[in-house]
Amino acid sequence: MVAMHELFTLPKAELHLHIEGTLEPELVFALARRNKLNVPFPDVESLREAYRFDDLVSFLTLYYSCMDVLRTEEDFADLVTAYADRAAAQGVRHVEMFFDPQAHTSRGIPLDVVMAGLTTGVERAQAAHGMSTGLIACFLRDRPVVEAHETLEGLAPYADTLLGVGLDSAEVGYPPSLFTDVFRDARDLGLRVVAHAGEEGPPSYVWEALDVLGVERVDHGVRVLEDDALVRRMALDRMPLTVCPLSNVRLRVVPDVASHSLPALLSAGLVATVNSDDPAYFGGYVGDNFVALARDLGIDRDGSALLARNSFLASFLEEDRRKELL
Ligand code: ADE
Ligand code: ZN
């Protein structure tokens, strides 16, 4: 079996990472102390114990509640720094990082605080690790569509700082087509577009993400295998998927890594990539996902190299930097 250190040093891009999902219990308590806030858990161990989920919605409840400790520019910068230090140690050379503006503005944190903190964090990641970064602002699909429009208006002055927009949060019952106009406006601002689809939602949501929102990458998308025509279409278009194996296990999309459909996605000719999603909550960073695939699915050295190569091909990197990293 390919050694863990080889999988950690294999250069890779991470394309599906929610920065708020990198909030480790230790950092929750440290930020709560700094901001003089109470954590509704007695200690780090009991909070970590609560990181057990039945499905996406049960995870999101804890995910949004832990974010309450993120208050200042420095908090957001420190969050990015903590992620970048861990990710660099697992071979991440480039990250396209999601953040959830509405999860902060809805609790009174101004967008400029969030943007300033994230920007400081990514500058530090570049300086410390030579890690390149793109920021992708996600709309929360289970909040009113009008709020997504307002959020995009708030983001417009930062269009040059942002790489793109995405769509996340509770999926079932919130089809991508609800956000047709917001995504059109985002594309008009020159932003790249991606969306979570086919994590818990049906293949029809993936069709909508492609045909109605015009996404350039599908986040998760593991349910595409239920629809042969969709698989053919995505293979033909070389439409990438950002797959998150440990997340899928923890959110019970699949029973275990050994039964994950990643090999079937690759055999179907799809450009699949491996990512960590919310690593603090799901038991591992991106290198840990590669290790789990090697151990439980027998993905060998060549398979891991293909997945790492796919991560650069599926990224929105400028060609010069892509060539440098490939
Ligand atoms: N927000 C953070 N992680 C998410 C996931 N896996 N799916 C949808 N929304 C999310
Ligand atoms: Zn996600």
Image: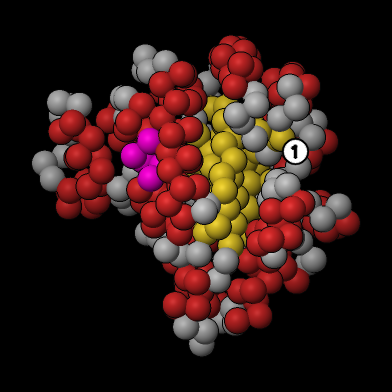
Residue 253 x %, y %: 52, 55
Which is nearer the eye, 264 or 108? 108
The region drawn magenta spans 77-81
Which residue does the image show at 55% across and 57% down from the upper left?
A: 93
For mark 1, does the 10 Å Cα neighbourhood hold few (<14), some (14 to 19), or many (20 or more) residues?
many
Which residue does the image show at 64% across and 74% down from the upper left?
A: 305
Residue 176 x %, y %: 69, 31
The correct choice, above or below, for 109 with respect to 58 in the image is above
Main secondary structure of the magenta stretch: helix
Q: With 63 as the anchor, is 153 left or right in this view?
A: right
**Which quadrant is the C terminus positioned in?**
bottom right
| 79 drawn magenta | yes
Which residue does the image show at 70% across and 20% down from the upper left?
A: 182
The correct choice, above or below, for 313 with respect to 213 in the image is below
- Identity of the amino acid at label 1? Val
| 308 drawn magenta | no
Element type where label 1 sits in the image: loop
Regarding residue 66, the answer to whether it shows in the image is: yes
Regarding residue 58, the answer to whether it shows in the image is: no
Q: Residue at the bottom extreme?
A: 1
Which is nearer the eye, 111 or 324? 324
Q: How many marks?
A: 1
Residue 65 x %, y %: 32, 31
Q: Which residue is disc 1 drawn over?
A: 215
Which is nearer the eye, 119 or 234? 119
Q: With 217 as the anchor, is 39 left or right in this view?
A: left
Q: With 242 as the anchor, is 57 left or right in this view?
A: left
Residue 319 x %, y %: 76, 51
Quarter of the image where one finds residue 161: top right
Which residue does the image show at 65% across and 33% down from the upper left?
A: 164
